[in-house]
Amino acid sequence: MNSALFETVLRKTYRLYGQKDGSKVPSLLTDDDTPVVALFIAARREMGVEFLTMEPETLWLSMEISDYNKQKLQAALTMATRPAFYWSPRVYSLSVALFNNQHAQADILAPCEPEEMAWASVCATLLYGVTSDTEDEPYYDDEVAALVAVNLHDRGIVKAPTQLEFAQDELDRLLTPEGLELQAKVKSLETTDSKAEDPIEEPSALRVQQDHLSRVDEYLNAQLQVLETTLGKL
């Protein structure tokens, strides 16, 4: 992930969240494509910090917001007030979908893509950070880590992306000796900042692993860019 871009988004998020109440940006509240972090800040700007403790029914009657964005904002509010994202597999799975602008069913633990889980962790860091009185982000519970590990393993990934490193121990338990050996090679290439070179028609297992991690980074950078652009409308 582009660390400079993340820092820019982080600063903008903190600055905008702390600005004067009463500003209305109805287009962001009704646009289902609005990133969840920008949606959260738009609601705070319009309703004031009191929106964190308002009953959902009262909140929905007090603002013009689409039905889908109600689900996204509720997930963001849960993150800010009772961050079950970190300890409940069901809340985690639902939040991953909503933080990636996807529809989800609350009673189903749907499969999660690596890049989507990584982006959900970035969103969680931003949402928890602007509302928490503590600097330390909560630890991920073992059950959530196990869920993430299973999703990574199902997609053939042996080394968790940086944002999902909390699940690495659980993932290691699922790997064969060959998988652990491949993981060591991936880590070795990361320390030397190099890339496996293979014929395009027959990429090696190592190259495939690097492509997995590159795909996550590309997705995160794209989402950060969208978020930064949307924050510019606030």
Image (tube, helix red, strand yellow):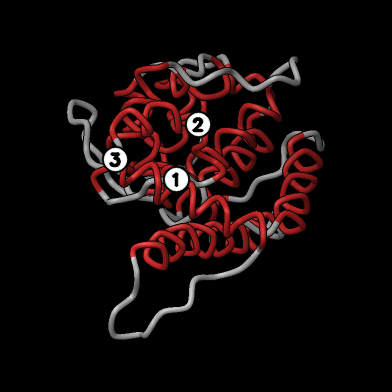
Q: Considering the numbered disc 2 on the image, is that residue within a helix, a strand or a loop?
A: helix
Name the kind of residue labelled 3 in the image: Asn
Residue sitting at x 37%, y 65%: 208
Dot 2 and dot 1 residues touching (CB under 8 Å) = no
**Pair 2/3: label in front:** 3
Residue 159's label in the rendered image is 1
Question: Label 2 sits on what residue type?
Answer: Ala
- From mark 1 to mark 3, how far is it between C-alphas? 12 Å
Q: In which quarter of the image is residue 53?
A: top right
- Residue at image position (35%, 18%) is 143
Of callouts 2 and 3, the N-terminal one: 2
Residue named by callout 2: 76
Check the picture and name the quadrant holding the N terminus: bottom right
Residue 30, position as x, y percentages in the image: 45, 51
Residue at mark 3: 151
37 lies above or below 21? below
Instruction: Identify the element where label 3 is drawn.
Output: helix
Alpha-carbon span between mark 2 and mark 1: 28 Å
